[in-house]
Image (spheres, helix red, strand yellow):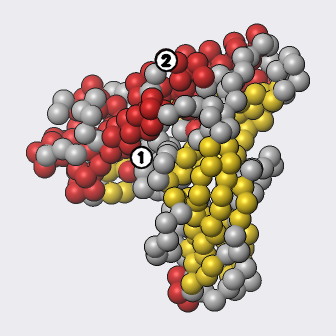
Amino acid sequence: MNWPPILDRVVRTPREYFCPIGPEKAREILSCSPADIRDLGHVYGADRTRFDAFDVWNIGLNSGSGRSTPERELRYLGHLLASTDWLDAVEYRLALEAGCPRGPACTSHDWRRPRLVGTSWSDPSYLPGRVRWAATTRRQGMHSRIRLQPILHAWRHTLASYRFHYTHPGLAADTAATRARRVGNCTGLSAVLAEDLNSRGVTARTRCGFLWGGLVGLAHEWVEARDADGRWKPLDPSMAALAATFFSPEYQRFCCGSMLNRLIPVASGHTATVQHWCEGRLLTTYPALRRASGGRLPRPNPMTNPTTNPLMPR
């Protein structure tokens, strides 16, 4: 692999957000040879035995090899988008699962799930330190066009000025850092776009939920702006930024004002996290959303683990 031009497209993770992985994990993500990883170590930095997980995912994203994990996952999502209708009414049977960082030592059954729009829930089932809710959600896509020119100007500016990058959640929450780096994940790009819209006199807010990929749901964020007709209309800058390479120009245009039937929003003002009270402490975790098919409950998935976030390394 010719690493230098690939690394030129990667905005490195600052040291304070570094999440180290070894050469074997990096090779697994990049699907390359041991020699390629040794070569990458030579140009990546002085410490050739440690890489940042987010950097490696961004190297894969920009590698053009077609073999890396991020490329394969995004091309699979692109296949789903190309082979299914975006607006049809659909019903998904889901399992929402979460685990306490204390594992089986936890005896608390005090859990609060996220409020997913259009979703009916079963009573939770428990194992020590774990919880699962079964759910049925009904979604229908929505097609609309943006009328206000300030919304369109902000949208075009965002797509022209920023690229998608896998990003540590702490860094993604820093909007000033996203502006300075000119890259971000769904959290960072949505925050930048919402700020830009508000500065132009447009009422805008960020929303969160899950993007349903057929087997699992990825936590996701986007923007809603109030258009000239008084309606809230969605803007999905991260998916639009990825569309040129992994999806289609048609889907990029769809991201400006229309809602995909694979998007499962959390109620406005709420988050996509699970809250859990354990030994007098409130813990917040990212749940796993997957197709309901039984099976084992998940291992603990704490919010502090940077590899469990939307469109992020796992």
Please say whether residue 61 is visible from this viewpoint.
yes
Task: Name above or below for residue 70 compared with residue 106.
Answer: above
Q: Position of residue 110 (x, y in %)?
A: 73, 79
The residue sitting at 46% across, 22% down in the picture is 248
22 or 279: which is nearer to us?
279
Q: Which residue is mark 2?
A: 249
* First reached walking from the N terminus: tag 2 or tag 1: 1
Q: Nearer the viewer, residue 106 or 112?
A: 112
Under circle 1, the secondary element is: helix
Outermost residue on the top side: it is: 149
Q: Residue furthest left?
A: 35
Q: Position of residue 104 (x, y in %)?
A: 53, 87
The residues bearing labels 2 and 1 have C-alpha atoms spaced at a distance of 27 Å
Position of 95 with respect to 216 (left or right) is right
Relative to residue 261, is residue 292 depicted above or below? below
Circle 1 sits on which residue?
A: 54
Q: Position of residue 174 (x, y in %)?
A: 63, 42
Q: Secondary structure at mark 2?
A: helix
- Other residues around mark 2 within 10 Å, as few (<14) / some (14–19) / many (≥20): few
Q: Quadrant of residue 235?
A: top right
Quadrant (top left, top right, bottom left, bottom right) of the C terminus: bottom left
Q: Residues within 10 Å of mark 1 (few under 14, many from 20)?
A: many
Residue at image location 66% in from the left, 58% down from the top? 136
| Residue at image location 54% in from the left, 22% down from the top | 252
Q: Nearer the viewer, residue 59 or 298?
A: 298
Q: Quadrant of the N terminus?
A: top left
Q: Position of residue 140 (x, y in %)?
A: 68, 38
What residue type is disc 2 on? Answer: Pro
